[in-house]
Image (cartoon, rainbow, N blue to C red):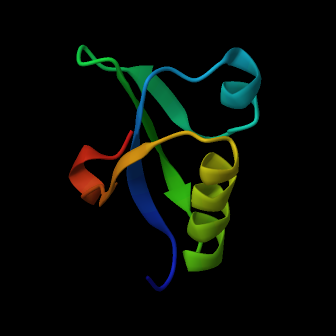
Amino acid sequence: MSGSQVVEIVVRGTLGPDLVAALPGFTVEVTPDACTRVVGTIPDQARLLGLLDMLDELHIEVVSVNPVPARDAP
């Protein structure tokens, strides 16, 4: 990953308000299948890995990480 990229991270379950507040600049929404979509711009791979590490440390199951095409970005 080079340069900034909009990504969608899907996690199982819902995120508490404190965690959502710790994700400024991200759109967070609960899906009908009881997962949560976190969408936002990641400036580089280090930031993406840091975010994924944080979720892992909090024992939040990551279902998928997907690039968001520019036409679909929030």
- Of residues 40 and 50, the one drawn nearer to the viewer in this rendering: 50
Q: Is residue 2 above or below residue 68?
A: below
Furthest toward the front, the residue is: 59
Residue displayed at 43% across by 82% down? 1
Residue 33 at x, y = what percent? 24, 19
The image shows a total of numbered marks equal to 0
Q: Is residue 55 left or right of residue 1?
A: right
* 72 vs 45, nearest the viewer: 45
Q: Position of residue 56 (x, y in %)?
A: 60, 52
Q: Identify which residue, 69 or 37, lies in the foreground.
A: 37
Q: Is residue 49 above or below residue 22?
A: below
Asked if 62 appears above or below 12 in the picture, the reply is below
Work out which residue is located at the far bottom of the displayed protein and give it: 2
Left/right of residue 46 with respect to residue 8 in the rendered view: right
Residue under the image location 71 percent in, 29 percent down = 19
Task: Estimate the x, y position of residue 37 in percent, counting from the top left.
Answer: 39, 33
Tell me if residue 43 comes above or below residue 9 in the rendering.
below
Q: Quadrant of the C terminus?
A: top left
User: What residue is shown at x 67% (from left), y 65% (from top)?
Assistant: 50
Relative to 57, 35 lies left or right: left
Q: Quadrant of residue 12?
A: top left
Who's the residue at 70% across and 38% down the image? Answer: 24
